[in-house]
Image (tube, rainbow, N blue to C red):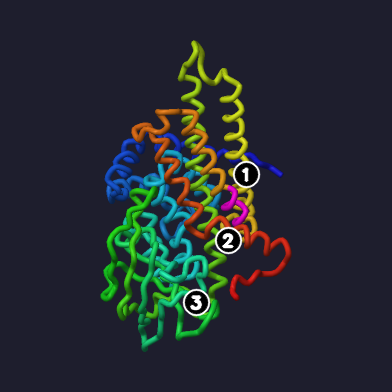
Amino acid sequence: MNFDLTDDQIALQDTARKFAQAELPALADEVDDTCKPVNHDWLKRYAEMGFLGVNTREEHGGLGLPHLDAFLVMEEFAKVSVGVGFPVFECCAGPVRIVEALGHPDLAARVVSKAAAGEMLVAISMSEPDAGTALTDLRTSARFDGDEIVINGTKRWCSGAGHSGGYVVFCRFDGIPGAKGVGAVFVDKDTAGLSFGPQERLMGFRGVPSADMAFDDVRVPREHLLVEAGGFGKLMGLFNIERLGNATMALGVASGALEKATLYVQERKQFGKPIVDFQAVQLRLAEMAVKVEASRLMIHRAAARAGTGLPDSQEAAMAKCMANEITREVTAAAMQLMGGYGYAREYGMERRVRDSFGWGIAGGAIDIQKVNIAAGLVGRRFSQRG
């Protein structure tokens, strides 16, 4: 087994790191202070550097590289902040991958190409007021009416709602109950009948819009169908890419915290010497480093084995669970090491702590990942009903 990155991967990682560290810290502060997403001009810069299309097919304007290459870039952006890294996450690991894999060729050519060019962000719309972890309870309905699909219902906790230009909407077709009735449709933001609620005020993830979505007889062309009833398994198979992206963003938050804390403890002096000379600080740094590296190895293994295809569901769940838990532990430890400076907003560590909690809620909560992991170990699904 070769754990070394290729020369090309190292070069891509280095390019992303230099860009993120030199260009994005001030933007990260602005995004966090104003809660406004990365603007169009910045998206164009991301695109010009190739960061939004790393694992997008070349015919759609991407680089056509494996998922691992995209995750290398994503980690470097997330080290700076979730707000500045979220567009990379959405384009490289999020719903764009579903559109590219399952969309009508004309739809994929339009949407994926625009995403890679920084001209469109795409969000995934899954959760509802009564359907989060219990996703197969969703009620948003879809029915065919000639050459159109008609959608009605309400969505909640959609990251990107009201800002993204397009949405992958999970729907129930023709009233078919359970997972067998679930499919997905692509909806453009300006489609008649689609409206958005007020922006949520979240603990972290500032600069990542989140709002309710209402569908009132929303009509889209039949060619916007991504998956019809019975294709729930296809959707969740592709969602494993997003799970690894989620894990990578969590890893980036943790590894950024580790890097900042490591520098701080060598500069900060107490009792006449750098605090890194105290054994308690050394032990805490080592524990943080072990957690970060273990998480990185789990993500890279799952991504490397997937190549340009689909990650193994068990490996994706394990990687997400691990990264979601260690990012909370590592950022909290880093804040404690930095003392008052860690708690002060201007030094960026408290932002990492706030953001660290979001990833273990989004994309399938930590505990449901553990249930899925246990199901994989014993070879059967566990019913949560009754």
Q: Amino acid at mark 2?
A: Ile
Judged left or right of residue 378, residue 220 is left
Give above or below for 307 relative to 103: above
Residue 233: give x, y in percent of width and height: 57, 71
Dividing the image into 4 quarters, which one contains the N terminus?
Answer: top right
Asked whether residue 162 is drawn in magenta, I would say no
Element under label 2? helix
Q: Nearer the viewer, mark 1 or mark 3?
A: 3
* Residue 236 falls in image quadrant: bottom right
Work out whether mark 1 precedes mark 3 in sequence or the reverse, and give the earlier one.
Answer: 3
Identify the residue shown where x is 57% and y is 19%.
Answer: 278
Residue 158: give x, y in percent of width and height: 39, 62
Q: Can the viewer see residue 44? A: no
Q: Which residues are magenta?
A: 316-322
Identify the residue shown where x is 43% and y is 46%.
Answer: 355
Figure label count: 3
Residue furthest to the front in view is 386
Q: Can the viewer see residue 383? A: yes
Residue 60: give x, y in percent of width and height: 42, 60
The numbered mark at residue 368 is 2
Q: CA distance from mark 2 to mark 1?
A: 22 Å
Give the residue pinned by disc 1.
297
Judged left or right of residue 184, residue 121 is left
The numbered mark at residue 182 is 3
Looking at the image, which is closer to me, 28 or 341? 341
Q: CA distance from mark 1 to mark 3?
A: 34 Å
Label 2 crowd bin: few (<14), some (14–19), many (20+), radius 10 Å: some
Looking at the image, which is closer to me, 79 or 276? 276
Asked whether residue 318 is drawn in magenta, I would say yes
